[in-house]
Image: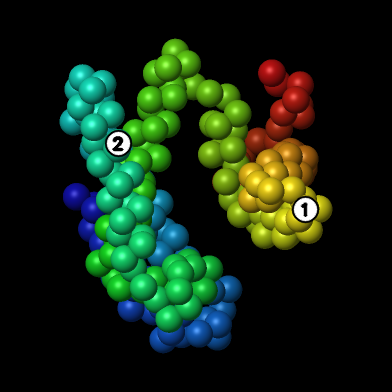
Amino acid sequence: MTILFCSAVLLILGLYFDGARCGDEVLWLANIALMGCAFIYTGILLRLAYNKYLASCRRCYVALLLVTAFVISVVSYRYNFTDGGYMAMVAGTYGTWYWFVLSAVSGFVSVLLLSTFLSARGRGKIKFLCYLGQNSMVIMMFHSLFINTGKKIFLEMPPTALFGTIFCIAMCVPCIELVNRYVPSLTGHTQRSEKWFVLKQ
């Protein structure tokens, strides 16, 4: 109940102090951080719910829930009209609050169920996906720079977004290793990485 309460309070505060109300005058965009923390608590809550209620269910039921959650996420996102035409958490642009919450929660459920399916199919954790998830804070620090650079490099190729994403991830790996080695406290790690990721495989 504590996690649910914290998630609800942070979500309400994040929706109230949105970009339209606060603009970009808040120090370090603390109002956006409220929504980010709400998402973190929501993810923890959904994971606990999955372990308690769905971990032992038949895979066909979980697959049905995965498809349903994905469809709900896509439809609710499409129906959530904003002034700028799209949602942008970095700008505090959330659109209609109930469509925003529905698309976010159903998106959480989709990712959670998909990750468990991939893990079960591979008979264990997929190391590279775990690596990216555990270092998502570093990726958030650098992804904007590398994605924009990737778009310029792969501008002439048809699947620009795909190549740009691959380029971004490839460029973030050295940054992750450097941060984990020299300033691990930025990502919540208490110990330095002993070896580079490529040597851990």
Mark in front: 2 vs 1: 1
Percent position of residue 144, x then y:
67, 59
Count of numbered circles on the image: 2
Distance between the alpha carbons at the discs numbered 2 and 1: 35 Å
Percent position of residue 108, x then y:
36, 46
Q: Residues within 10 Å of mark 1 (few under 14, many from 20)?
A: few
Asked if residue 140 is positioned above or below residue 34 in the image, the reply reads: above
Q: Which mark is residue 83?
A: none
Q: Which residue is mark 2?
A: 66
Q: What residue lies at 70% left-to-right and 44% top-to-bottom?
A: 163
Color encoding of the figure: rainbow
Q: Quadrant of the C terminus?
A: top right
Q: Which mark is residue 156?
A: 1
Q: What residue lies at 33% left-to-right and 78% top-to-bottom?
A: 16
Please tell me in which quadrant of the rendered image residue 62 appears.
top left
Q: Nearer the viewer, residue 24 or 143?
A: 143
Residue type for callout 2: Leu
Q: Nearer the viewer, residue 8 or 75?
A: 75
Q: Is residue 129 visible?
A: yes
Q: What residue lies at 30% left-to-right and 36% top-to-bottom?
A: 66
Percent position of residue 95, x then y:
36, 73
Q: Residues within 10 Å of mark 2 (few under 14, many from 20)?
A: many
Q: Is residue 4 left or right of residue 36?
A: left
Indicate the secondary structure of the residue bearing disc 1. Answer: loop
Q: Is residue 173 left or right of residue 62?
A: right
Residue type for callout 1: Glu
Indicate the secondary structure of the residue bearing disc 2. Answer: helix
